[in-house]
Image: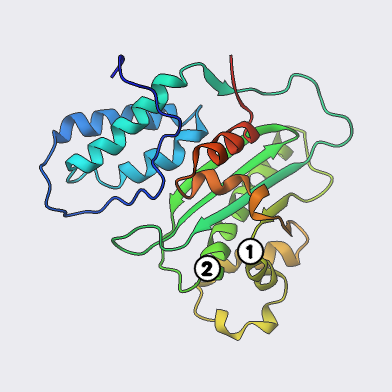
Amino acid sequence: MKDCNAAVTPTEMGLRLERGIEEEDVDHTEFRRIIGSLRYLCNTRPDLSYGVGIVSRHMQSPKVSHMNAVKRILRYLRGTCNLGIMFPCKKPRGEMKLVGFADADRCGDMEDRKSTAGHIFYYGKGLVSWNSVKEPVVALSSCEAEYIAVAQAACQAAWLRMLLKELNAELIQPPTLFVDNKSAIDLAKHPSAHGKSKHIEMRFHFLRKQVNDKKLEVEHCSTEDQSADIFTKPLKAARFCKLRESLGIVRF
C-alpha cells in the first residue's frame, strides 16, 4: 500500500460493515496482522480509534468489504504519516483542569444494534486519554445510549483523578464532562423525574453518584463542539479534520 492514493479520512461516510454477508473470504492471518499493527498505532493516533475499532469486530470471518475498509485506513495513514499529538510545553496560566467529552452513536452496529461510545480527556490543553468502544448493552433510546457513554467516561475520570493525586497534581476542582444530550444530563442530575430509567443497569448509575457527591460536573455542549464525535461515527472530511485538530494532532 506504500504507493496507494492517500485518503482524507480513515472511514467513508455512512460506513456500515456486516457479518455473515455473501462475499469472498480474505486471508484471516493477513487481516489480523494488519489489525494488530493498526491497534498499536492507536496508542499515539487517536484519530484512528473509531475506524480500527469498527474493522476489529470482523476478525473472526473477514470478507472483501472488511478488507476494503482496512485498506481505506491504510490509505489515510499513507497521507498522514507526519501527524502526531502535540503536547504544549508551556504551563497554561491559572489552574490545570481535567476536562472531558463523551458521546455515543445509537445502534451503530447493524448486527446486534449496540451503540458505539467514545470519550476523551484533556489535562490543561494536552490530550491524555481517549477511547472508542462498543457499549455492553443495547440502548432503548438515544438518551440511554448517551447516559451509558457518560457513565463509562465517569469511571475514567475517577481513575485519572486518582492518578493525578498519586503524581502530586491533585485537582482543586472536580473534572468537567461535556455532553451534547440534555436528557442524559438531566437523568444524571435529577433521577426522581425519570421513572423510565429503572431498567438501566445499576452499574451505569455510578455516574449519578459521582455527580451527587460533587466529584464530577456534567455540562451541556453543542453538537458542533462535541469533540468525541470522532470516536463514534464516520464523519465528512471537513468535520473530521476540524475535530482532529481539536485533539492536538498536528503535522511535524
Reading the image, the residue beneath label 2 is 142
> In the picture, residue 208 is in which quadrant?
bottom right
Near mark 1 (Cα within 10 A), the count class, few <14, some 14-19 or many ≥20, is: many
Label 1 secondary element: loop
Horizontal arrangement in the rendering, residue 74 relative to residue 93 (left or right) = left
Q: Is residue 170 visible?
A: yes
In the rendering, at what x and y percent does residue 82 appear? 51, 16
Q: Is disc 1 in contact with disc 2, using a CB cutoff of under 8 Å?
A: yes
> In the picture, residue 154 is in which quadrant?
bottom right
Reading the image, the residue beneath label 1 is 181
Name the foreground residue: 245 vs 62: 245
Name the foreground residue: 63 vs 91: 63
Name the foreground residue: 68 vs 148: 68
Q: Amino acid at mark 2?
A: Ser
Q: Residue at x 43, y 20 (%)?
A: 79
Q: Is residue 35 visible?
A: no
In the rendering, at what x and y percent does residue 166 appear? 70, 36
